[in-house]
Image: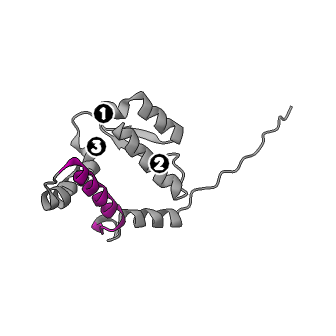
């Protein structure tokens, strides 16, 4: 349920911003939660594509590993421990919001990820779909 909830949040965020989810790549390891029928069906419904890393290859998941390192350094070590699970859940939600909306990332020009992605879509709009009917030549 946790992986599916995270997927739903990501899809909702894109849809809410007016972005198409078709072709979105959902990268993960080979955990059972990412290979589960419900998860893969939801990816298919959204038009998203699963990208599952190869077993034992840390480079496949380098982005996630880099995020985990930052998460531990910036939140866990600097702000923990927490009194209870509710305090921890709030701290994690606040960190993710800060990381995506306000934290400056040097690798993308010292802007937050949401701003970088918005700029990308503003300068690279998705092609509009044109439907046409096909008529028989016979």
Q: How is the image coloured?
A: one colour
Asked if the residue at tag 1 contacts the one at tag 2, i.e. Cβ–Cβ closer than 8 Å, the answer is: no
Residue 98 sits in quarter: bottom left
The disc label shown at residue 30, or none: 1
Confirm whether the magenta stretch covers residue 25. Answer: no
Which quarter of the figure is the C terminus placed in? top right
State how far apart marks 2 and 1 are (Cα): 21 Å
- Residue 78 is situated, as x and y percent measured from the top left of the image, at 14, 62
Earlier-in-chain disc, 2 versus 3: 2
Contact (Cβ within 8 Å) of mark 3 with mark 1: no
- Mark whose residue sits in front, 2 or 1: 2
Range shown magenta: 84-106
Estimate the x, y position of residue 7 in percent, counting from the top left: 41, 44
**Quarter holding the N terminus?**
top left
Task: Identify the secondary structure beneath mark 2.
Answer: helix
**Category of crowding for the residue at label 2, using alpha-carbon neighbours closer than 10 angstroms: few (below 14), some (14–19), many (at least 20):** many
- Left or right: 14, with 34 as reference point: right
Name the residue rendered at 35%, 35% in the picture.
Answer: 34
Q: Is residue 10 above or below residue 97?
A: above
Q: Which disc, if any, is residue 11?
A: 2
- Placement of 113 over or under 27, stated as above or below: below
Q: Is residue 135 left or right of residue 87?
A: right
According to the picture, the residue beneath numbered tag 3 turns out to be 60
Q: Is residue 6 above or below residue 82?
A: above
């Amino acid at each position: 349920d946790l992986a599916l909830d995270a997927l739903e949040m990501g899809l909702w965020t894109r849809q809410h911003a007016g972005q198409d989810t078709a072709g979105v790549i959902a990268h993960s390891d080979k955990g059972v939660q990412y290979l589960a029928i419900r998860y893969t069906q939801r990816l298919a419904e959204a038009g998203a594509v699963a990208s599952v890393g190869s077993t034992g290859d840390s480079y496949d998941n380098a982005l996630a590993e880099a995020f985990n390192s930052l998460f531990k350094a910036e939140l866990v070590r600097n702000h923990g421990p927490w009194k209870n699970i509710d305090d921890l859940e709030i701290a994690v939600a606040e960190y993710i919001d800060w990381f995506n909306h306000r934290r400056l990332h040097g690798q993308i020009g010292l802007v937050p990820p949401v701003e970088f992605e918005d700029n990308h879509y503003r300068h690279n709009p998705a092609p509009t779909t044109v439907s046409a009917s096909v008529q028989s030549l016979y």
